[in-house]
Amino acid sequence: MRADAVGRVAYEAVRLQLLNGQGGLCGFCEIGLHDIDPLKCRVEHFHPKSDTSTAHNWALDWQNMLAVCMGGSQRHQQPPHALEPLPENLSCDAHKDQMIQTQRLAEHCEGWIIDPLDLPAFPSLFFLEKSTGRLLPDEQACAGIAFPGNKHRGTQELVQHTIDMLNLNCDRLCQARTRVLWDIERNKKSFRLQNISPDEALRTLAERYLRQRWPGFFTTIRLCLGTAAEQYLTDAGFQG
């Protein structure tokens, strides 16, 4: 699609439409891509577009496309878009491709990792380890959700394998989530000093953070604000 001028225009239109549909977030790690910088965002085909085993055109299947960040692969970018040492801080499709090339992940990865388009809106399947910024499977939430075609023993294993294969707990992303957490905690403290009740403070923060569709590291914010965030998203008609 990017081989000539006409294809490049089409590619940029697809990339922009995907990004708008995802609320300006990377489809894997949720880094904010709201500035629409082409050096920070590309189109990922979850199923390999080169698959010609059937008549299905995976390259042009809209449900097979995601707007994703560069996965930390460009050294000239500032954190959280890149961080040395580079190999350890690759994520998203850059790390996924590396896992496929080293045969630690099947090229046809359906059932081995979760397609973001298949994630339920409620509940969140993740837990945030606040001391480190790491994402972990939420055991209780995972127990209530089944994924057709799951190749693992259960949803919890599927979520963990997704985190591992996309390297969502690399230092670069954990540091970025921790900065988001610290910002939220500073705001909570400000409300406490104003003698505002915890419930009211959380409701106000949920509206402040989530009224934008959607802030970077959306799931981190959602997990930090807990029930207040879930209620706000429910009232806003959030559908994932």
Image: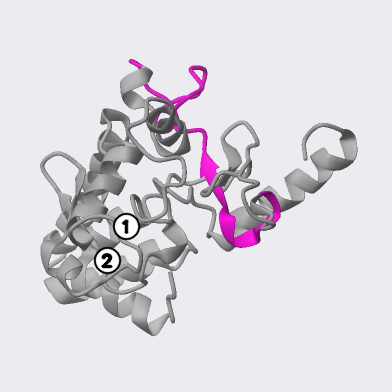
Q: For mark 2, what is the residue?
A: 124
Q: Is residue 163 depicted above or below 199 in this figure?
A: above
Residue 29, x across and y down, in percent:
39, 45
Q: Is residue 23 left or right of residue 165?
A: right
Identify the secondary structure beneath mark 1.
helix
Q: Nearer the viewer, residue 123 or 187?
A: 123
Q: Give, as a three-letter code, the residue at label 1.
A: Thr
Q: Please identify the dominant SS of the magenta region.
A: loop
At label 2, which amino acid type do we have?
Answer: Ser
Callout in the foreground (2, 1): 2
Q: In the structure shown, which secondary structural element does the residue marked by tag 2 occupy?
A: loop
State if disc 1 and disc 2 touch (CB < 8 Å): yes
What is the residue that sits farthest to the front in this orientation? 53
Mark 2 Cα shell of 10 Å, populated few (<14), some (14-19), many (≥20): some
At which x and y percent is residue 198?
13, 71
Residue 211: % across, % down: 44, 68
Q: Is residue 24 above or below residue 176?
A: below
Q: Quadrant of residue 166?
A: top left
Rendering quarter of residue 71: top left
Q: Is residue 130 above or below residue 120?
A: above
Vertical side of 176 occupied by 201: above or below: below
Q: Which residues are magenta?
A: 59-85
Disc 1 residue crowd, few under 14, some 14–19, many 20+, Cα 10 Å: many
Q: Is residue 78 inside the magenta stretch?
A: yes
Which numbered tag is attached to residue 111?
A: none
Residue 92 horizontal side relative to residue 46, left or right: left
Looking at the image, residue 236 sits to the left or right of residue 141; the answer is right
